[in-house]
Image (tube, helix red, strand yellow):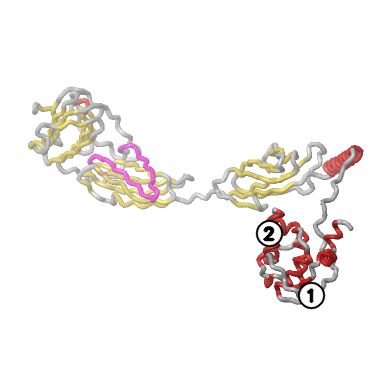
C-alpha cells in the first residue's frame, strides 16, 4: 500500500492502531483540542492564513473560525466537516481523527466512520513546457510571416484610403469674433504626414502645413472685417489622394461702428467777464479720444464789432534786453494762443487752464472721436483786468526775487526769496507791482495776460516797475 493509500484511508489505520475506543464508549483521550491541533500544525508547516487560503481554497474567515473553535461562523456541520478534512490533510493531520475529535468535543455519539475519500489535495505543479530549437524557429517564422502580412495590409489601406480630416478649433463651423480681432488659430487632426491646405477669397496662395506625427495640425490665418470663409483640405503627398470631405469654416468680424462724440462744457460760462486772464476750461465728453481748445480775439472789452474773417496775426518781435516792451492786443478776428489738445480721462472729463489777455474772446472746444467725427461748442468771454496782475516764470536757471505790491514790501519777501528753474509765482496789486530779480535774463513776466518775456540779461540784477497802462520801467530800488 502506498503513502497515498494511507492518506486517503486513515480509518483502516485507526482500526489497526486501536483508535476506535472512543466509538465503543471509552472516555475521550486527553490532549490538545481540535483548534489547538490546527494552529500547532499550521505553525509547524510555517504558513500563515493567507497562504493557507491560497493553497486550500478555503476562505480565511472559515480557517480562522476553525482555529478558534467558532463553529457558529461556519455555514453548517456538513461544510464544517469538509473544511476540517481538507485543512487536516493540508496540515499533515489524520482527517478522520480530527473529525471524530470535533464530534466528541461537540458531544455527538460517534460510530465507526465509513471510508471517505477526502477532497483532493493541492495538485503538484505541472510539468513545465519545454521548447526545442525547431519549435522556436517555427514560431519565429510564423511571427515574421504574420508581421509582414500586417505590414502589407497597412500599406494597402494607406494607399487606397484618402487622409482623414477634422477641425477641432473652432468647434463650430460658423463663428463670430470681436470687431478688433485680426487673426485666428485654426487647429485640427488628420493623417500623420498629410498636407493641410487652407484657401480663402483674396489669397493668391493657400495656407499650407504638414500634419505632425501625433496627427495634429495648426495654422494662424489673417482675418478682415466682414465674412471670412476658409476651405480646408488634407492631401496625401505620396498618393496624391485628397480627403473625401473638405471642411469649411466661416469667421465673421463685425465692422467697427464709431459713434459721434457728445460734448458738455461746464466752464467757462458763455458771456462771463473775468478780472484776470486765467480762464478755466472744463467739461465732459463721450466717444471722444481728445479735446482741442482754440481761441479767437473779438476786440477790446466792451466792443461789439464782428471779427474780420480776413485778419491775420501781426508778427511779434521779442524785446531786446534792456528795452521796455509795450503790451498790445492782437488784431480783431485773429486767433490768440495756439490751439491746445488735451486727453480725455477715463470718466470722460477734461480740464485745462487758458491764459488770455484783456479783451473779448471766442473759446471753441472740439471733441474728436477715433473715426474723425467731431462735436464743438463755443463760449464768448471777456477779460477785463482790474488793477495789476503779474505772473513771474523762472526759466533757464535760478533767480533771487524781491517784490513790492502797491509800494509795500510783499509779506515774506523782506530778504527776498530764491526760486528755481520752472517755478511760477503770481502777484496782484491795485496800482503797481515792483520786482527786484538777481538774474534778469532768467525772469520772465506776464502782465495782465500779455507775455513780456525776459527784460534783461542772465546773471544781471535789475528792478522793474509794472503800473499799467504805463509801460514797464526800470528803477533803482534794491
| x, y percent for residue 152 | 87, 40
User: Which residue is labeled 2 in the image?
Assistant: 40
Q: Residue at x 72, y 39 (%)?
A: 213
Give the Cα distance between marks 2 and 1.
29 Å
Q: Residue at x 31, y 42 (%)?
A: 307
Q: Quarter of the image containing the C terminus?
A: top left
Q: Is residue 359 magenta?
A: yes
Residue 101 in sight in this render: yes
Under tag 2, what secondary structure?
Answer: helix
**Quadrant of res 65:** bottom right
| x, y percent for residue 5 | 87, 60
| x, y percent for residue 199 | 70, 42
Label 1: few (<14), some or many (≥20) within 10 Å? few
Viewer-proximal residue, 272 or 252? Answer: 252
Q: Is residue 472 magenta?
A: no
Residue 152 in sight in this render: no
Viewer-proximal residue, 328 or 33? Answer: 33
Q: Are marks 2 and 1 in contact (CB under 8 Å)?
A: no
Label 2: few (<14), some or many (≥20) within 10 Å? some
What's drawn in magenta, residue-wise? Answer: 336-360
| x, y percent for residue 291 | 38, 44
Side of 121 relative to 172 (left or right):
right
User: Which residue is labeled 1 in the image?
Assistant: 24
Q: Residue at x 26, y 32 (%)?
A: 422
Q: Residue 289 shows which numbered tag?
A: none
Viewer-proximal residue, 468 or 124? Answer: 124
Q: Quarter of the image containing the N terminus?
A: bottom right
- Earlier-in-chain disc, 2 versus 1: 1
**Quadrant of res 193:** top right
Q: Residue at x 75, y 74 (%)?
A: 26
Amino acid at each position: 500500500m502506498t503513502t497515498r493509500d494511507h492518506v486517503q484511508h486513515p480509518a483502516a489505520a485507526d482500526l489497526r492502531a486501536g483508535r476506535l475506543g472512543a466509538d465503543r464508549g471509552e472516555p475521550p483521550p486527553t490532549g490538545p483540542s481540535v483548534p489547538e491541533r490546527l494552529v500547532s500544525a499550521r505553525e509547524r508547516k510555517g504558513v500563515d492564513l493567507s497562504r493557507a487560503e491560497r493553497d486550500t481554497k478555503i476562505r480565511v474567515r472559515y480557517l480562522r473560525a476553525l482555529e478558534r473553535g467558532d463553529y457558529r461562523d461556519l455555514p453548517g456541520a456538513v461544510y464544517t466537516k469538509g473544511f476540517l478534512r481538507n485543512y487536516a490533510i493540508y496540515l499533515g493531520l489524520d482527517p478522520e481523527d480530527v473529525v471524530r475529535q470535533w464530534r466528541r468535543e461537540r458531544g455527538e455519539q460517534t460510530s465507526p466512520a465509513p471510508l471517505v475519500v477526502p477532497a483532493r489535495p493541492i495538485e503538484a505543479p505541472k510539468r513545465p513546457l519545454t521548447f526545442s530549437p525547431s519549435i522556436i524557429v517555427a514560431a519565429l517564422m510564423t511571427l515574421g510571416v504574420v508581421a509582414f502580412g500586417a505590414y502589407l495590409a497597412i500599406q494597402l489601406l494607406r494607399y487606397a484610403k484618402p487622409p482623414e480630416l477634422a477641425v477641432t478649433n473652432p468647434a463650430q463651423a460658423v463663428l463670430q469674433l470681436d470687431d478688433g480681432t485680426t487673426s485666428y488659430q485654426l487647429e485640427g487632426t488628420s493623417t500623420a504626414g498629410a498636407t493641410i491646405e487652407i484657401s480663402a477669397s483674396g489669397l493668391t496662395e493657400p495656407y499650407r502645413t504638414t500634419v505632425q506625427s501625433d496627427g495634429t495640425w495648426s495654422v494662424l490665418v489673417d482675418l478682415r472685417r466682414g465674412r471670412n470663409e476658409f476651405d480646408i483640405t488634407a492631401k496625401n503627398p505620396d498618393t496624391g489622394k485628397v480627403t473625401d470631405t473638405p471642411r469649411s469654416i466661416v469667421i465673421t468680424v463685425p465692422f467697427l461702428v464709431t459713434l459721434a462724440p457728445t460734448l458738455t462744457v461746464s466752464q467757462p460760462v458763455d458771456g462771463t467777464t473775468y478780472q484776470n486772464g486765467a480762464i478755466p476750461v472744463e467739461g465732459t465728453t463721450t466717444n471722444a479720444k481728445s479735446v482741442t481748445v482754440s481761441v479767437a480775439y473779438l476786440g477790446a472789452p466792451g466792443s461789439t464789432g464782428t471779427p474780420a474773417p480776413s485778419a491775420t496775426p501781426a508778427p511779434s518781435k521779442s524785446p531786446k534786453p534792456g528795452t521796455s516792451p509795450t503790451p498790445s492786443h492782437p488784431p480783431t478776428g485773429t486767433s490768440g494762443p495756439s490751439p491746445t489738445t488735451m486727453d480725455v480721462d477715463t470718466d470722460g472729463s477734461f480740464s485745462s487752464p487758458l491764459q488770455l489777455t484783456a479783451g473779448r474772446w471766442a473759446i471753441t472746444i472740439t471733441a474728436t472721436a477715433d473715426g474723425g467725427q467731431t462735436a464743438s461748442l463755443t463760449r464768448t468771454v471777456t477779460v477785463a483786468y482790474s488793477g495789476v496782475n503779474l505772473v513771474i516764470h523762472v526759466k533757464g536757471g535760478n533767480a533771487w526775487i524781491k517784490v513790492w505790491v502797491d509800494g509795500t514790501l510783499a509779506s515774506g519777501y523782506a530778504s527776498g526769496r530764491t526760486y528755481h528753474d520752472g517755478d511760477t509765482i503770481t502777484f496782484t496789486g491795485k496800482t503797481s507791482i515792483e520786482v527786484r530779480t538777481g538774474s534778469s535774463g532768467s525772469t520772465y513776466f506776464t502782465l495782465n495776460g500779455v507775455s513780456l518775456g525776459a527784460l534783461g540779461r542772465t546773471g544781471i540784477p535789475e528792478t522793474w516797475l509794472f503800473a499799467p497802462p504805463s509801460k514797464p520801467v526800470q528803477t533803482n530800488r534794491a
